[in-house]
């Protein structure tokens, strides 16, 4: 695909306005700037659905700042979309010319289903669904989008008038009670009931939440340790109970909740709980992909022909000048070692962890582009903090852990619980592969070498004594490695034969 110029999208939501500027990097948007302002536009709607002066002024001030940043952009390289509040405000016709003058570009007020399509486009191009049918739910400030699909074109799309801002204003202005929460959930369920029969008949394999409310809920649940992964109804009920007991979100002092989300958290939580109850959702994962990402993929019109994560790994190798020969050697050997350690896990778990071992091996030296000293720490930081299309933040954290553990003192990994055996296997496989490949040359290992693990003996490497004699540096490194594992209470034994 030919390179395209720098592209910009502006998402004028009911809660926040966002400007994102990207460059097209071989079909993937590489973010170079992302500006977000909590405008609370929907908060300015009065009983007659007219925007008050204060909300209009907040919006115009934000748009003027965005306009300054976009100065010099060609109109064909900028797309501005506005969502629910722009759709429902009775006096939007008076406000729109002022908004476009402040921004310097035309504003497209999109329909609810077009918003749903763009949200889904962002998710389907970035989330590795592996052919699974997805239910995507995006709770915005004034509307919530529900989409089902597995391919580029969604099967079902709907936008309902449920939002974290509008529901927070409607139900949670004073002291929050059990009655308030139940009223909000019941009202939201009544709206969702319009689509529940059709959606449940269509079915889905995985539920995905996008945008601010889903992110805030997932972060708070994770911070309080209320679910093993993602979002569950029982975890949300515990959060609701805590808010009710304290009388407000602010007094509940929820860990992981950003200050700017406090005012609208209860409304978003009630809507999400209603969606779980009405659609019988068991569990939901969160993805960073959202409307702004869908806008970019509309720009570049790329096709889904592979796992986005694979493309991202290749791009990171290029960007950070990774030696592909060395990465391939480490990836091949770590895969061999991990297979030897994984005789007693399920096929699904093996495939899952094998991917992460391989990706970590292919990217373990990205930090060398910064410095050779402590390069594994630089690698870990890059993989944790960089924008990696297709990878969720938890997935990036996992890759970061693996590459951090590839060498050096293992005591830095002691926060990993002992029952995370597959993670320990992945760490061991990668460390051993890096150790054997330290010469950065094609490697000839003895044919009868074997690696295994058992609860009684720990990790055991069987290897020919003659090979160790011929490779004294590696032999010495293996001795040091046994001490590293011993220092954290684990056993690694080298059996020479």
Image (cartoon, rainbow, N blue to C red):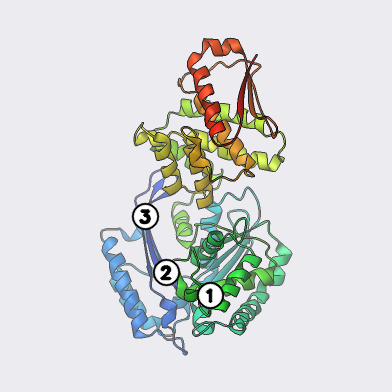
Front residue of 494/223: it is 494
Q: Is residue 13 left or right of residue 489?
A: left
Which residue is at the far bottom? 48
Q: Is residue 15 visible?
A: yes
Please tell me which of labels 2 and 1 falls first in the chain: 2
Residue that numbered label 1 is attached to: 266
Q: Is residue 301 left or right of residue 373?
A: right
Residue that numbered label 2 is attached to: 259
Label 3: which secondary element: strand
Q: Position of residue 348 (x, y in %)?
A: 69, 43
Front residue of 427/414: it is 414
Label 1: which secondary element: helix
Residue that numbered label 3 is attached to: 7
Q: Is residue 26 visible?
A: no
Single out the mark in the foreground, 2 or 3. 2
How far apart are the alpha carbons under marks 3 and 1?
Answer: 35 Å
Label 3: how many Cα within 10 Å (few below 14, some 14–19, many 20+): many
Label 2: how many Cα within 10 Å (few below 14, some 14–19, many 20+): few
Front residue of 199/349: it is 349
- Is 279 above or below relative to 89? above
Q: Please give the name of the residue rendered at 44% of the width and 41% of the height, measured from the top-left corner.
A: 380
Q: Position of residue 338 (x, y in %)?
A: 62, 32
How far apart are the alpha carbons under marks 2 and 1?
Answer: 13 Å
Q: Is residue 157 left or right of residue 33?
A: right
- Is 154 above or below relative to 320? below
Cβ atoms under marks 3 and 1 closer than 8 Å: no
Label 2: which secondary element: helix
Q: Position of residue 64 (x, y in %)?
A: 28, 70
């Amino acid at each position: 695909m030919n390179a395209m110029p720098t592209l910009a999208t502006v998402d004028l939501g009911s809660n926040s306005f966002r400007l994102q500027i990207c460059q097209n990097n071989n079909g993937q948007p590489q973010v170079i700037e992302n500006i977000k302002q909590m405008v609370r536009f929907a908060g300015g709607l009065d009983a007659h659905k007219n925007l008050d002066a204060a909300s209009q002024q907040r919006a115009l001030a934000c748009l003027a700042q965005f306009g300054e940043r976009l100065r010099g952009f060609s109109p064909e390289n900028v797309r501005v979309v506005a969502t629910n509040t722009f759709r429902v405000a009775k006096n939007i016709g008076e406000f729109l010319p002022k908004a476009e003058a402040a921004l310097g570009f035309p504003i497209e007020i999109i329909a609810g289903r077009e918003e749903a399509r763009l949200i889904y486009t962002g998710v389907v191009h970035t989330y590795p669904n592996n052919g699974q049918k997805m239910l995507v739910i995006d709770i915005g400030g004034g509307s919530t989008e529900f989409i089902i699909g597995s391919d580029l074109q969604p099967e079902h799309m709907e936008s309902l008038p449920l939002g974290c801002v509008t529901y927070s204003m409607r139900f949670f202005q004073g002291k929050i009670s059990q009655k308030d929460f139940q009223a909000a959930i019941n009202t939201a369920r009544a709206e969702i009931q319009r689509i529940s029969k059709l959606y449940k008949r269509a079915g889905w394999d995985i539920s995905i939440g996008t945008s601010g409310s889903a992110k805030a809920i997932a972060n708070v649940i994770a911070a309080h340790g209320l679910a093993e992964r993602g979002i569950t109804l029982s975890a949300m009920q515990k959060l609701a109970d805590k808010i009710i007991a304290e009388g407000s979100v602010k007094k509940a002092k929820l860990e992981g909740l950003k200050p700017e989300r406090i005012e609208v958290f209860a409304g978003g939580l009630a809507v999400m709980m209603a969606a779980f109850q009405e659609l019988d959702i068991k569990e939901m994962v969160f993805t960073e992909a959202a409307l702004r990402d869908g806008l970019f993929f509309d720009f570049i019109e790329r096709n889904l022909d592979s796992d986005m994560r694979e493309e991202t790994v290749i791009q990171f190798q290029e960007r950070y000048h990774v030696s592909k020969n060395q990465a391939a050697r480490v990836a091949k050997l770590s895969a061999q070692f991990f297979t030897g350690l994984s005789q007693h896990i399920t096929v699904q778990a093996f495939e899952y962890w094998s991917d992460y071992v391989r990706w970590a091996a292919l990217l373990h030296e990205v930090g060398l582009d910064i410095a050779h000293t402590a390069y594994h720490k630089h690698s870990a930081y890059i993989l944790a903090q960089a924008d990696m299309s297709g990878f969720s933040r938890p997935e990036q954290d996992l890759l970061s852990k693996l590459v951090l553990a590839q060498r050096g003192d293992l005591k830095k990994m002691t926060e990993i619980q002992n029952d995370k055996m597959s993670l320990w296997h992945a760490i061991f496989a990668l460390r051993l592969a890096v150790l054997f490949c330290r010469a950065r040359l094609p490697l000839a290992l003895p044919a009868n070498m074997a690696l295994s693990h058992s609860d009684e003996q720990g990790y055991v490497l069987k290897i020919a004594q003659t090979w160790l004699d011929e490779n004294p540096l590696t032999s010495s490194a293996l001795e040091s490695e046994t001490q590293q594992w011993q220092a954290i209470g684990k056993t690694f034994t080298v059996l020479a034969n």
